[in-house]
Image: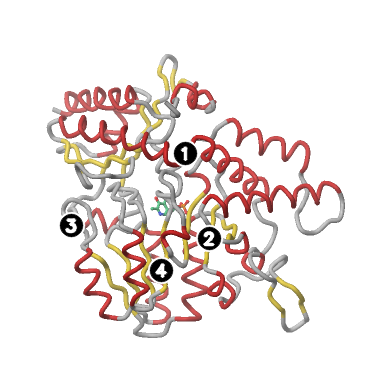
Amino acid sequence: NPFDTTKIRQDFPILKREVRPGVKLVYLDSAATSQKPIQVIDAIDSFYKLTNANIHRGIHVLAEEATELYESARQKIANFIGAQSSRQVIYTRNTTESINLVASSWGRKNLVAGDVVILTEMEHHSNLVPWQILQEDIGIRLEFIPVSDDGQLDIEKYHQLLDLKPKMVAFMHVSNVLGTINPAKEIVKAAKSVGAVTLIDGAQSVPHIPVKINEIGADFLAFSGHKMCGPTGIGILYGREELLEAMPPYMGGGDMIKRVYLRSFKSNELPYKFEAGTPAIAEAIGLGVAVDYLERIGMQNISHYEREIIEYATDRLVEVSGVKLLGPLNKERGAVASFDLFNVHPHDVSQVLDMDGIAVRAGHHCAMPLHDRFQLTATTRASFYIYNTIEEVDLLVDSLHKVKKLFG
Ligand code: PMP
């Protein structure tokens, strides 16, 4: 078995802690942020202890070493997602900033009033609000691929929407609420056939399933380091080179320029054109180590293991009477389970679970319109990653029975 959870768990120091005396942590909130293995923590620690310097500037040993670590992490990330060149991999703070960069830079350059942008009803706010800002500022028109009762995109309706000749189709790969794995390749192919540019929000796919951008063929891919065993404060925007070349800078300042005059500037080349100011150096290096870590386990192995866990979890959860589980059942899905427990507010549910050391998320999970779609204001979400076990699913279900007893 290439997948040894016991061994993996030993890499995550936080999993050893008790949240209260005698109560062990059961961390089921990895869709919000993943825990970090010791390899990543050590890499950051050792960067600050031994190498810390600013990059791309000084000609001294530390600056050269720091630059080398920062750039080799970029190359690792490029390989990890199947990008042709590391010039296409831009460091940002997170998925949110990556999408804002595209909406602002590509959008303001390429969109005019009346242009259609297609999104989906299941989007995270970070792939809704940046486009709503353009709707306000430029007058673009937003259209949405509807979500079915079992949490899947209505692809037939999508094909009809393509008759509107959209300029952009931007969608999430894996839903952070429903667990739905959207048919990215098919969506991109259809978008391309009408000349639309495509953006994938990979926040919940890149950490969990093999994502090769050269196979999917999308123009942009956004994701966050902190959901894939990496540090907070570092994210990635992958972009097709011709598009990135033609886009204006997103922010101005140091590092993103080749030459500055009093009244004008010349932009730097890719990827630096989009990296103004001193970046999150230690975090980028940490993300490179996180990528090494995931690759050592193998993304294919990770996705198989998570499928086992989520299948078991959905089977057990639907057995609990009163649980209404969102998302596709008996289908391949991502490792998140959001549910409504009849009559009990998700905040109360998670408070009772917390008594047992179980960390889940309660709320709208930054997808208010999706919750509107299901006539809910909030759900309780358990999400799983490489270090979770079948036993932890059992603990969750046991604890849910306690909730039911407490709240009648
Ligand atoms: N998109 C999806 C699908 C997400 O799950 C998240 C994180 N909840 C985001 C975007 C935003 O990620 P970040 O907060 O790291 O920018």
Specify the quadrant of the image occupied by residue 171.
bottom left
Q: Which residue is mark 4?
A: 198
User: Which is in the foreground here, disc 3 or disc 4?
Assistant: 4
Pointers 3 and 4 in contact (C-beta within 8 Å): no
> Who comes first in sequence, dot 2 or dot 4?
4
Q: Residues within 10 Å of mark 4 (few under 14, many from 20)?
A: many
Specify the quadrant of the image occupied by residue 111.
bottom left
Distance, label 3 to label 4, CA atoms, is 22 Å
User: Which is in the foreground here, disc 2 or disc 4?
Assistant: 4
Distance, label 1 to label 3, CA atoms, is 29 Å
Left or right: residue 145 compared with residue 80: left
Q: Residues within 10 Å of mark 3 (few under 14, many from 20)?
A: some
Pointers 2 and 3 in contact (C-beta within 8 Å): no
Q: Which residue is mark 1?
A: 34
Q: Which residue is mark 3?
A: 148
Identify residue type, mark 4: Thr
Identify residue type, mark 1: Ser
Q: Which mark is residue 346?
A: none
Identify residue type, mark 3: Ser
Distance, label 2 to label 3, CA atoms, is 30 Å
The residue located at (22%, 23%) in the rendering is: 402
> Who comes first in sequence, dot 2 or dot 1?
1
Q: Which residue is mark 2?
A: 237
User: Which is in the foreground here, disc 1 or disc 4?
Assistant: 4
